[in-house]
Image (tube, rainbow, N blue to C red):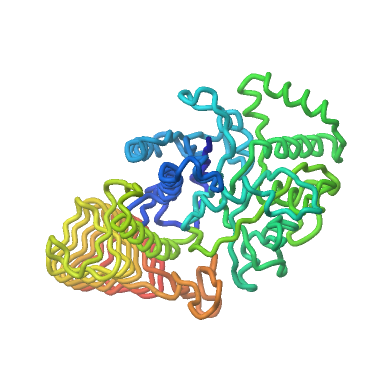
Amino acid sequence: MLKAVILIGGPSKGTRFRPLSLDVPKPLFPVAGLPVVQHHIDACYRLGQKRSSISEDNSNSNVGKYCVAEVLLLGYYGDDELAEFLLTATQSYPSLRIRYLREPDALGTAGGLYHFRDTILAPLDNSEGEQVQAFFVMNGDVCADFPLDEMLDMHFNNNSHQSQHQQKQPVLITVMATETTRQQSVHYGCMVVDKETNIIQHYVEKPSTFVSNTVNCGVYLCSPRLFDTIADIHLEILNSNGNGNQQNISSNNKNNINQQQQQKPVEERVAGAMVIWMEQDVLRRLAGESGSSCSSMSSGGDGSGRIKKGSKCGGVALAATTRNWWSQLKTAGAAIYANRHYLALRQQRQRLLQRESVIDLPLPSPVKCRLATADPKGYSTIGNVYVHPSAQVHPTALLGPNVSVGEGAFIDQGVRIKESIVLQDAVIGQHSLVMHSIIGRRAKVGAWCRVEGSAACSDPNPNVAYAKMTPQLPLFNALDGRLNPSITILGCGVNVESEVVLLNSIVLPYKTLTRSYKNEIIL
């Protein structure tokens, strides 16, 4: 049995995604018709569907042996902010148990896992005590064609990835990795990987100089034994903070301390929760582990490691490098890029379903991709387009390519939309043009308007191999103080009056625009 943990953060995160995250939590922002985190859940669900389509006697594939039984959302949003989504997701994926675990505070990408370790490893009520073999950990701001089956095969068939003369060691974590350019690599967690064994030999989070083209994608497959390593890190940091230096703790003492922690009241355990990072603390500790000692934590790059050289690890970390599409959802421009790829993936799967009816990979009921040049309702589309069933689109409108129209939206006659996202209950007036933009919830664009953003900001360089989206450009140009090229964003409830031109601008919620703007932020 497998589980999946999706790290969704909290209200203090995702500030670069504003103003889109001011009225809806960033993990619930709709991309290609689904909230961002539902694409993660959908990937876990499809893994289980693949399991049911593989013959039981096919022992060479671990996809046929393991499937995700429970998905845990881990963050510190209020329970009420996610309640409606959890209800809808549970109804859409009845074979998955989906729950939300609320952290007492921001505990880091590994601190929250350790805080809820008992829940993560607990068997399901109907599993007759079946143990958790491994669990996925997925950053909530990652958008990708998730190769979970490939990660499974590498994680459980690791013997084939270690040379015969090398001592066989348990795999504690398998990291989804990809390649990027030399210049862009310093914006990510960089890994030096042995090409023969796939073992991560060195890891540095956002180094100041070039380390490797192979970068961390923020998706992990973890063994339950990884919690032993995190427990060591927790105790060492606790001991270092308390005594000012690092002390050697025997295995028996560690077990005794762990038992004492478990016996403490819940209030004391919550108060003692500690911030631990998967990247800076755990991966750097495991990198290069070969049964002797870990790589130095104080050397290399940003110098933010907190665990000293010589600590025992007892396992290895593998890198599962993929060439599938991958991106981070850090800025609004990334949402346009992700929308395009998720629409394309959805269409590929629909075509697969039509060709191979034996494989049952049902999509959530609200999701449809319209590819025909003329929709049955009368309006025309180009390329991949998603329109919610409740949205109203005039027969003379032209949508696409790569357009998503949300629930209750209204598109009037003669409207042209391309490379854009129109959110819930938005209105686009007649004969208006919307390109490379996001129209916020309940926003209204009048007649004969032009709302346009920059295409370059939402795409990697097509002429550079392995190029990714630039993680963060300066918001303003240092020379003239103007807004750097970006998509145009209308916040929630914005009203754009007729015959207004809005180019490369960001409008905060509930503003009324009576004149044209270019390269500005309207506060």
Residue 75 in sight: no
- Name the residue located 28 percent from the left edge and 69 percent from the top edge: 383
Give the camera-side residue of 246 and 325. 325
Q: Residue 172 is drawn in which quadrant?
A: top right
Q: In x, y percent, where is residue 276?
A: 67, 42
Q: In this view, does 224 lie above or below 473?
A: above
Q: In x, y percent, where is residue 206?
A: 66, 61
- Name the residue located 60 percent from the left edge and 38 percent from the top edge: 113
- Name the residue located 85 percent from the left edge and 31 percent from the top edge: 250
Q: Is residue 374 left or right of residue 467?
A: left
Q: Residue 410 is drawn in which quadrant?
A: bottom left
Q: In x, y percent, where is residue 193?
A: 70, 61
Residue 258 in sight: yes
Q: In this view, does 176 lie above or below 432?
A: above
Q: In x, y percent, where is residue 373?
A: 20, 70
Image quadrant in which the C terminus is located: bottom left
Give the camera-side residue of 113 and 267. 113
Q: In this view, does 290 lie to the left or right of 52?
A: right
Give the camera-side residue of 388 and 276. 388
How many badges with numbers are in the image? 0
- Name the residue located 71 percent from the left edge and 47 percent from the top edge: 281
